[in-house]
Image (cartoon, coloured by chain):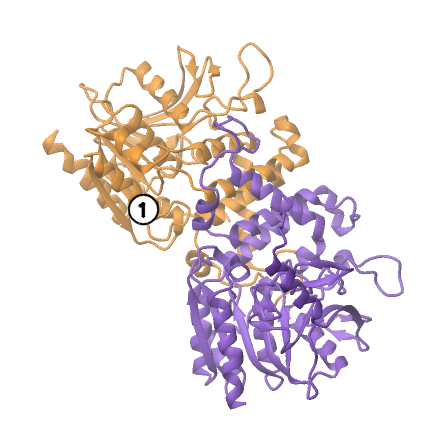
Chain colours: A orange, B purple
Amino acid sequence: MAKEIVITPEIEAYRREVAEIPYVSSKLTLDKPIELSSGDVLDGVEIAYDTWGTLNDDKSNVILIEHALSGNSHVADAYRKGRFAEGWWNRMVGPGKAIDTRKHYVICTNVIGGCSGSTGPSSIIPGTDRCYAMDFPVLLVKDMVDAQKAFLDQLGIERIEAVVGGSLGGMQALVWAKRYPDMVERCIAVATTWRTSAQSIAFDEVGRRAIINDPKFNDGHYTKEDPPAHGLAIARMIGHITYLCDESMTRKFGRTLIGDNIDFTMKKDFQVESYLEHQGYKFVERFDANTYLYITRAIDYFSLSHSLEGVTKRFKGTKTKFLLLSYSTDWLFTTSQMRELSDALVRAGAHVTFAELTYPFGHDSFLLEEDVQARYFKAFLEGGEDDR
Amino acid sequence: MAKEIVITPEIEAYRREVAEIPYVSSKLTLDKPIELSSGDVLDGVEIAYDTWGTLNDDKSNVILIEHALSGNSHVADAYRKGRFAEGWWNRMVGPGKAIDTRKHYVICTNVIGGCSGSTGPSSIIPGTDRCYAMDFPVLLVKDMVDAQKAFLDQLGIERIEAVVGGSLGGMQALVWAKRYPDMVERCIAVATTWRTSAQSIAFDEVGRRAIINDPKFNDGHYTKEDPPAHGLAIARMIGHITYLCDESMTRKFGRTLIGDNIDFTMKKDFQVESYLEHQGYKFVERFDANTYLYITRAIDYFSLSHSLEGVTKRFKGTKTKFLLLSYSTDWLFTTSQMRELSDALVRAGAHVTFAELTYPFGHDSFLLEEDVQARYFKAFLEGGEDDR
């Protein structure tokens, strides 16, 4: 299934532009311990991060990008280890893109609890030779944000021009605006919600059970070479269905068979089955099962407030400007949830732009759609410059 | 979680009425082999069935009820083994109900491939001492219907006043009308579709993978005492989420915790998690994992025709009258799919009544709602008597 890319002159020109953008991919160890919502304390926390562009003299051009469940710090295209590598949101972030790495100093960190360089369940417990596994403390989205705050503190960054994210990334962006309103000028939250619904919790829980019930899970003590692959693949397949929508699956697969005729088999017979299995097991190669548990748990616990009135109260008088975008076919984090949030923020007196974009790829639309979404981003990021 | 029922005088009176309805619960062995769509032949097929009421002299008052994925032949309330036992559709079928067992001779059979008395994967292969397990042939809904046809033939029943079902039951009802139009006067199909969508296939496939990947599954050769419980429970949990809807889950559970505060745990912490787990493992006690595979497979393969034009062509000139009902919150088998079917049948010149009912419990609404649905059933069943 590897894509063969024909390198056109346009692509070559673009890649040269990418190569000209200053790029750092590194790790930073926090010099202070992090106190978590659970009461646990994490010491020696490492944050994996990537940056693109140049921090200006008054350190006012920082855009912080937050990743979703399966993301990492590689948000934009870059030459990593000498090779061109695609970023997960390269449609929106890069030279000349809506989030322009020529103008902005773009930072993206891997969340704590993650498995792409930052401290998480697969990290070694300081002073021991074993990894945390299930001894890692259960996190909230708030804790992920607080770790990022400590990271920025250490870099001496005191101002965020915009914090931007979709899905779990949007939750983090909203929590940034909630906890550090004086630091965050703009907040862009896409395809997300103000609190995770019972249905989302239910899907997450089934995925977690699939992992935990896999005999190879062994209470979290598996090796990288022999992970609970079936359980994690099942979890990913469930997740994947919720990232698409009936419409996109019908368009993409419909009832198309793998062969010419139905096979009367329990094995894969429809293309959608083969696609799902491929997605599930491909995920196992790049993702850690324990991290899947911890991050989905943080998502489940996410709630800006117990009520919409609470949201309004909490954001009263905020100076942060909000851009909220939902997708019409996103049934995981719906437009109606986003509208509730928008209304609650407007009632708080906040400057809010809210739009529902029409795009037929469900929740994943925010990763796939670059036309209308990019225009909203640009207008919001540029439009604000006059009245700063 | 057992419900405590207070026996009021009304309940007592109703139970006396139930006791007065002639009731048979039995098995019948088909005297001819069944040839399946796969080309396989099943011999000595047993059909578990229940009947309520009395067959009239001209055998014209038969109502055939079709069950859904996890159903059985016990559709209505009855005294079984001397004890009052609830039927799975007792809101709609019984004395004085929309499908009135005082007037009609109601028949319900367990589908072949099932695990509630009819021949299925847990049955013994004739002439051997081992059960079919995964050697059972893969079935289509058409095969389930053909086995029922053979069953009715053997009873000497040549006319069906109405064939009625929801979900997989609705698919069977539609296939009855497609294959045996001269036999079926009326067809009531509720919360179903004319072909299973890619999204539904995807959910089914993940459930099947969860079962097949469970080490206890052992290629279908497990014992009743030690089944692939975790896999089947996961499959049921996924299914269960699709039978509800975001709205009903929010109403029922929202984000309510089991305890007073969040527990920072990977174990169950939200009530919705505890509910799902309960549903999953309760299901394991009463259902067979192999049957789960076979029946979901039949559902996936279900398609009245490759296209809506094909449906119209196939039903051209049919004399069968159709009542099609969908539920507004059913996102598994949506109103839009049902509307497509209705239009295709109308184009075929069929007599169709189609309505979308508003009820906030998703796909399961057809099992839970008895007010509007019952009125539609009654009007449709009684209204037709004038012009027979």
Tell me if I can see residue B325 in this picture.
yes
Residue B201 spot, x, y in % from top left: 55, 58
Check disc 1 and give the amino acid type. Ser
Query: Residue A160, relative to residue A245: is it above or below?
Result: above
Residue at image location 40% in from the left, 46% down from the top = A364
The residue lying at 56 percent from left, 74 percent from top is: B174
What residue is disc 1 on? Answer: A326
In this rendering, the count of numbered labels is 1
Locate the C terminus of chain B by quadrant: bottom right
**A172 left or right of B265 in image:** left
- A305 shown above or below A44: below
* Residue A50 locus on image (x, y percent): 36, 26
Disc 1 on helix, strand or loop? strand
Residue B128 position (above or below residue A334): below
Q: Which residue is the extreme one toward the left?
A: A386
Question: In the rendered view of the protein, which quadrant contains the N terminus of chain B?
Answer: top right
Of all chains, the one bearing label 1 is: A
As drawn, the residue found furthest toward the front would be: B9
The local crowd at label 1, few if under 14, some if 14 to 19, many if 20 or more residues have their Cα within 10 Å, is many
Residue nearest the viewer, comparing B233 with B90: B90
Inspect this view and state whether residue A77 appears: no
Q: Is residue A83 left or right of residue B92?
A: left
Residue B99 screen position, x and y as percent: 58, 72
The percent position of residue A135, horizontal first and vertical second, equals 57, 21
